Amino acid sequence: MILDRQLLLSNAQPITATAVSTNTIDLAIARDIGIGDNLELFIKVIAAFAGGTSVQFAFITSANADLSSATVIVQTPAIPTASLVAGSEWLRVQVPALSQAAAMQRYIGVSYTVVGTFTGGTVTAGLALDREGTAYYPSGLNSGGF
C-alpha cells in the first residue's frame, strides 16, 4: 500500500465518542492526488476498541472544512466492539472519481458514529494508491530463482 501523509484523514485517532476525522482533504487545492489511479479509502483499527457497543464508519463529503452538514458517500453497518480488534480493516472501497463535482463537495473525510462510551480504540484512515495484501503459498513451494 502506498501512503501519502497528505491523504491521511485520521492517524491513530482515538475514537471515544461520535466524531469526524481530524484531517480533511480539500479538493479545491490544485494538486495531484492520484489522477488516473485507482484510489482506495481504507479505515484500519490500530488499537482495539473497548467499552462501547458499536461503531459505524462513513466516507463523507462536505462544503465545510469541519465536515459539518456532511453527505454520506458510503458507510458500514454498526460494527460491534468485539469485531473492532487491532489490525482489522473496515470500509475498504474504491473512491469515486474525485473530478465529479456533482458527487463530491469541496472537502472529504470520515465520520465515526459510536453507540456507547468507548474507553479505548484508535483508527487510521486515508486514501491509498494500492491495495495492501498478502499472498499465501502452499508449504514447500520452491521460490528459488524468482
Image (tube, grey):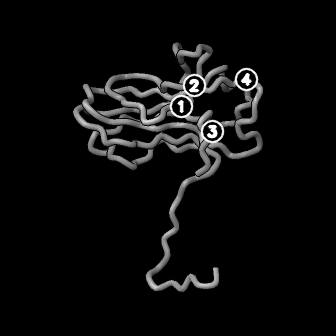
Q: Give the amino acid at mark 3.
A: Val
Q: Quadrant of residue 115?
A: top left
Residue 120 position within the rendered picture, expressed as x and y whole percent measured from the top left: 28, 34
Q: Residues within 10 Å of mark 1 (few under 14, many from 20)?
A: many
Pick whichever of labels 3 and 2 is earlier in the sequence.
2
Label 2 to label 1: alpha-carbon separation: 6 Å
Label 4 to label 3: alpha-carbon separation: 18 Å
Q: Front-most of 48 and 4?
A: 4
Residue 85 position within the rendered picture, expressed as x and y whole percent measured from the top left: 32, 46
Is the residue under label 1 in contact with that under label 2 (CB below 8 Å)? Answer: yes
Residue 113 position within the rendered picture, expressed as x and y whole percent measured from the top left: 38, 26
**Is disc 3 placed on a helix, strand or loop?**
loop
Is the residue under label 1 in contact with that under label 4 (CB below 8 Å)? Answer: no
> Dot 3 corresponds to which residue?
95
Pick whichever of labels 4 and 3 is earlier in the sequence.
4
Compared to residue 61, the image places residue 133 above or below, namely below
Pick whichever of labels 4 and 1 is earlier in the sequence.
1
Q: Give the amino acid at mark 4.
A: Ile
**Is disc 1 placed on a helix, strand or loop?**
strand
Q: Residue furthest left?
A: 51
Q: Is residue 88 left or right of residue 129?
A: left
Q: Front-most of 90 and 74?
A: 90
> Dot 1 corresponds to which residue?
9
Q: Residues within 10 Å of mark 4 (few under 14, many from 20)?
A: few
> Dot 2 corresponds to which residue?
24
Pick whichever of labels 2 and 1 is earlier in the sequence.
1
Label 4 to label 2: alpha-carbon separation: 12 Å
